[in-house]
Amino acid sequence: MMSRERRRKRSEDLQRDLPRLSWGDVPHSVAPYVPTPHNVVDTMLTLTHANSDDVVYDLGCGDGRILLAAVEDFGAKKAVGYDLNPKMCGMVRLKVHEKGLRDRIEVVNGNFFLADLSGASVVTLYLTTSGNSKLRPKLEEELAPGSRVVSHDFPIHGWTTVKKEPPEHYVVGSHKIYVYSIPEAYDQKSSILRSKEEDGRWRRIRDLFVRERRERP
Ligand SMILES: C[S@@+](CC[C@H](N)C(=O)[O-])C[C@H]1O[C@@H](n2cnc3c(N)ncnc32)[C@H](O)[C@@H]1O
């Protein structure tokens, strides 16, 4: 068992040599470390309706703020974070240990492209547009229906957000938040059938189409 003093010292050591690794130094990295402001984290989790049934995955978890907010503020059942940076992961683990949350927060020092995402119900991202594009096939392949994906500042090209009226993102100060629902984000047919109002509209279009074909000479 590590004493309080040793833990404090270790925390200071970790903070002092915090990652000065640049983006290009780390193989597989699709984003540098930049933290999401706490009020933006709060809005991201609110917009996904994160709750006690959820398992939240933060892909590229940085200092763990999203993991902690998910569990402490939104009561998520579990939060799992991946990050390539070992020092950052060490610091998050220490915080998790100090807060007695080891059974609810898991931190993996590794490449999230190798993670199994099938257990996630909410995925949070703050990467880059190209990083999101690389990740997109994996999200489509592994996330279960009903899962939500929220991305800070960068859209997932080719997906449709849950926000129907333009712009497609929510705004918090100078930050953009893109929220997606699985599978509606990429499966347009299920997106149309999901809302009752849209279902009615779709049926009317289909009826017109059928009538038009019937009446054709
Ligand atoms: C912009 S920061 C976001 C940190 C945190 N999610 C937040 O919003 O405060 C992106 C993080 O992703 C990590 N990262 C980039 N590519 C990764 C990969 N392939 N696997 C795991 N982590 C990665 C970086 O090390 C960095 O800490």
Image (cartoon, rainbow, N blue to C red):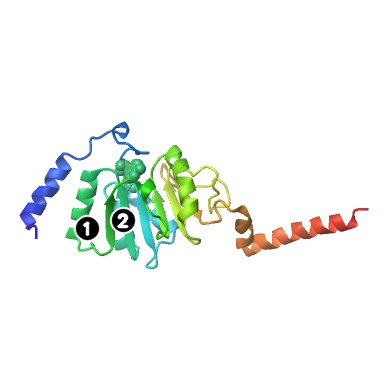
Say what amino acid the circle numbered 2 marks.
Leu
Asked whether the beta carbons under mark 1 and mark 2 sit within 8 Å of each other, the answer is yes
Element at badge 1? helix
Q: Is 201 displayed left or right of 130 in the figure?
A: right
Residue 171 image offset from top left, x and y in percent: 45, 47
Seen in the picture, residue 59 relative to 74 is either above or below; the reply is above
What residue is at 50 percent from the left and 52 percent from the top?
Answer: 140
Element at badge 2? helix
Residue 90 image offset from top left, x and y in percent: 20, 49
Residue 141 image offset from top left, x and y in percent: 49, 53
Can residue 1 be seen here? The reply is yes
The residue at the far right in this view is 217
Q: Residues within 10 Å of mark 1 (few under 14, many from 20)?
A: many
Can residue 170 be seen here? The reply is no
What residue is at 75 percent from the left and 60 percent from the top?
Answer: 204
What residue is at 8 percent from the left and 48 percent from the top?
Answer: 9
Give the mark, 1 or 2, whose residue is nearer the N terminus.
2
Q: Is 3 displayed left or right of 46 in the figure?
A: left
Task: Identify the residue position indicated by label 2 in the image.
Answer: 67
Task: Identify the residue position indicated by label 1 in the image.
Answer: 96
Q: Is 130 displayed left or right of 107 in the figure?
A: right
Camera-side residue of 128 and 172: 128
